[in-house]
Image (tube, rainbow, N blue to C red):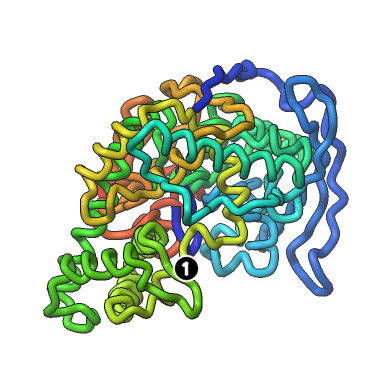
C-alpha cells in the first residue's frame, strides 16, 4: 500500500523461506564506498551490488543507498532503516536531500539513517514499461467470464511490456527478495543488528525481514499494518469496508465543518451526479475525459490524509459543473505506478472469483462502486505474467524484539482489523491505536503516534495507553 500524495495493496506459488539463521549472502558483502550525495551534503551515497536471484546467486543488481550519519556520534545507537510505503517510490533520493523533513531531530541525532532505492525503483534498475497499467477501455470490475478474460489479457500485455523494457530484474521484485537485499546492506554496513521502521507496504517488508532474519533486529516499528496472512478475498472485503468508512467520515466532516465547500449540500447526491456525469463522458480535465473509475481512485487516494479533505470537497464541487481537473490526478498517473504494480503483483495471489468479489465489494462500498486501493491491486494482478512468490500464512518469526504496531481508526488503505490480527499473531507485540482519520500516523497524520514510534526506537520502551 502506498504512502505518497496519491496514497496506498491468477497464479499462486509457495514462498520458500530461508532459515532464520541463514546469512543473507554466500560471502561477506564488500564495504560501501560512501561519498557526499552532492557538494556540501551531510548525507552520503553509495552503491551496493547484490545477486539478481538470491536462490541461485546468478546475475547482479546495483542498488542506490544513502546514509545520514548520526549528528551526535557520541550518542549513536546504530543504523535505522525505513520504508515509507508504496511500493515503487525510491527511498534513497527522497530523504538524501532533506531527512529532517521526515524524521524527528532525536532520531537524526542518534541514528545513522540508512535508505535504499529497492530494486525496480529510483536509481536501482527502475521498472520501465511499454504500455500503461491503466486502460480506461478495460472494465476493472468485470462480472462476466469474457470481461474477466479481457482484464487478464490487458494485465498480461502490460506485464510483458514491462519485462521487455526492464529486463530480468522484473521477475525478482518480490518482498522476500527485497528483504534479503536489506540484510546484505546491513552486512555491508558492518552492523550486527538494525532498527527498522516500516509504513504501509513497508510493514509487509518488515514482516518479511522479521521472518528471515529475526535475530538481526534491534527494534521493529510497523505503522499502518498490512496483514500478510489473509487471503486476497478477505483483504478485498476488509478494504471495501474501510473505504466506505472513509467516505462516510468525509460526508460527516463536511456536515460539521462550515469551511467545507460542500457544507450544507447533500454530499452523497453530489457524488452520484458527478459519477453519472463521468459515466456519460461529460467530466473533463482539459481535453481529456475523466472516467468514473479514475474519479473513484482519486477520491480514495485523497482520503489518505485528513488535511486533504478540503481539497476533495472543492474538487467535487468543481466536478459537479463538469470540471474534472481536480479529480483526475490519482494513483494511475503516478510515475512510480508501473513499479508499484510490478512489485505488488509478486506478493498478491490473484486467484479469486472476480465476479463474486465485484458484487461483494460493491455491496460493502456502494458509494464508490466497490473501489478500494486493494481492489486496484487485486484486479490489476489478474493475469500477471511474472511469478507470484507469496502464499499467505501467519507470521513464522521467533526471537523478535518487542514489536510496536500502530493503527488509526479511519484508515482507508490498511484497516484497523489488519493490525489487530497481526498483533494476535505476534506474542509480545504492542498495538498503539489512535482515533483519527488518515493512512498512517507517520509522519504527519497523528503527532501522538509519531512521538510514540520515536520514543520506542530510541529507548525500546512501549507506549502506555493509546493516542
Q: Where is residue 373? Give x, y as percent.
A: 40, 49
Q: Looking at the picture, tell me which residue is in the foreground, 18 or 269.
A: 269
Q: Is residue 110 above or below residue 10?
A: below
Residue 393 sits in quarter: top left
Task: Specify whether 301 is left or right of 257.
Answer: right
Q: Where is residue 255? Give x, y as percent.
A: 13, 73
Instruction: Give the mark count.
Output: 1
Q: Where is residue 100? Give x, y as percent.
A: 58, 68
Q: Where is residue 290? Give x, y as percent.
A: 42, 67
Residue 72 sits in quarter: bottom right
Give the class, few, some or many, for how many residues have Cα within 10 Å of label 1's Cα (few <14, many ≥20): many
Q: Is residue 410 above or below residue 431?
A: below
Residue labelled with disc 1: 329
Q: Residue at x 73, y 21 (%)?
A: 55
Task: Specify whether 72 is left or right of 427.
Answer: right
Q: Looking at the picture, tell me which residue is in the foreground, 183 or 191.
A: 183
Q: Residue at x 34, y 76 (%)?
A: 315
Q: Residue at x 64, y 69 (%)?
A: 98
Quadrant in which the C terminus appears? bottom left
Residue 291 sits in quarter: bottom left
Task: Specify whether 302 is left or right of 71.
Answer: left
Q: Looking at the picture, tell me which residue is in the foreground, 303 or 402.
A: 303
Q: Is residue 15 above or below residue 378?
A: above
Q: Residue at x 65, y 46 (%)?
A: 78
Q: Secondary structure at mark 1?
A: loop
Q: Is residue 462 visible?
A: no
Q: Is residue 41 visible?
A: yes
Amino acid at each position: 500500500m502506498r504512502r505518497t500524495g496519491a496514497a496506498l495493496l491468477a497464479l499462486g506459488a509457495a514462498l520458500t523461506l530461508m532459515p532464520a539463521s541463514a546469512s543473507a549472502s554466500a560471502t561477506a558483502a564488500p564495504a560501501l564506498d560512501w561519498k557526499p550525495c552532492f557538494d556540501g551534503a551531510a548525507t552520503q551515497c553509495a552503491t551496493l551490488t547484490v545477486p539478481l536471484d538470491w536462490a541461485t546467486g546468478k546475475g547482479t543488481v546495483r542498488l542506490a543507498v544513502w546514509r545520514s550519519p548520526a549528528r551526535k556520534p557520541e550518542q549513536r545507537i546504530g543504523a535505522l532503516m525505513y520504508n515509507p510505503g508504496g511500493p515503487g517510490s525510491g527511498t534513497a533520493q527522497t530523504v538524501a536531500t532533506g531527512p529532517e523533513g521526515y524524521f524527528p531531530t532525536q532520531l537524526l541525532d542518534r541514528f545513522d539513517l540508512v535508505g535504499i532505492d529497492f530494486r525496480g525503483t529510483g536509481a536501482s534498475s527502475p521498472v520501465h514499461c511499454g504500455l500503461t497499467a491503466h486502460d480506461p477501455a478495460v472494465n476493472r470490475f468485470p462480472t462476466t467470464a469474457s470481461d474477466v478474460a479481457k482484464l487478464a489479457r490487458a494485465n498480461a500485455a502490460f506485464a510483458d511490456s514491462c519485462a521487455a523494457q526492464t529486463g530480468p530484474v522484473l521477475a525478482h521484485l518480490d518482498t522476500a527478495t527485497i528483504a534479503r537485499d536489506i540484510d546484505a546492506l546491513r552486512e555491508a554496513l558492518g552492523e550486527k543488528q538494525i532498527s527498522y521502521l516500516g509504513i504501509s507496504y513497508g510493514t509487509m517488508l518488515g514482516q518479511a525481514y522479521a521472518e528471515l532474519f529475526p535475530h538481526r533486529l534491534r527494534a521493529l516499528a510497523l505503522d499502518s499494518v498490512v496483514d500478510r496472512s489473509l487471503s486476497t478475498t478477505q483483504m478485498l472485503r476488509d478494504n471495501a469496508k474501510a473505504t466506505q468508512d472513509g467516505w462516510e467520515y468525509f460526508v460527516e466532516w463536511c456536515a460539521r465543518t462550515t469551511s467545507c465547500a460542500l457544507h450544507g449540500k447533500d454530499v452523497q447526491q453530489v457524488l452520484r451526479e458527478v459519477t453519472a456525469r463521468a459515466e456519460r463522458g461529460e467530466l473533463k480535465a482539459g481535453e481529456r475525459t475523466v472516467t468514473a473509475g479514475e474519479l473513484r481512485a482519486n477520491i480514495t487516494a485523497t482520503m489518505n490524509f485528513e488535511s486533504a479533505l478540503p481539497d476533495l470537497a472543492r474538487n467535487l464541487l468543481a466536478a459537479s459543473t463538469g470540471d474534472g481537473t481536480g479529480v483526475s490526478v490519482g494513483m494511475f498517473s503516478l510515475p512510480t505506478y508501473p513499479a508499484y504494480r510490478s512489485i505488488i503483483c509478486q506478493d498478491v495471489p490473484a486467484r479469486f472469483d472476480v465476479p463474486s468479489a465485484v458484487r461483494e465489494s460493491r455491496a460493502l462500498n456502494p458509494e464508490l462502486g466497490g473501489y478500494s486501493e486493494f481492489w486496484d491491486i487485486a484486479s490489476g494482478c489478474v493475469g500477471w505474467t511474472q511469478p507470484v512468490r507469496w502464499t499467505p500464512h501467519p507470521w513464522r518469526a521467533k526471537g523478535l524484539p518487542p514489536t510496536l504496531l500502530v493503527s488509526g481508526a479511519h484508515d482507508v488503505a490498511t484497516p484497523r482489523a489488519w493490525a489487530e490480527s497481526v498483533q494476535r499473531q505476534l506474542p509480545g507485540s504492542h498495538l498503539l491505536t489512535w482515533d483519527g482519520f488518515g493512512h498512517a500516523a507517520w509522519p504527519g497524520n497523528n503527532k501522538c503516534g509519531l512521538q510514540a514510534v520515536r520514543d520506542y526506537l530510541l529507548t525500546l520502551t512501549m507506549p502506555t495507553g493509546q493516542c
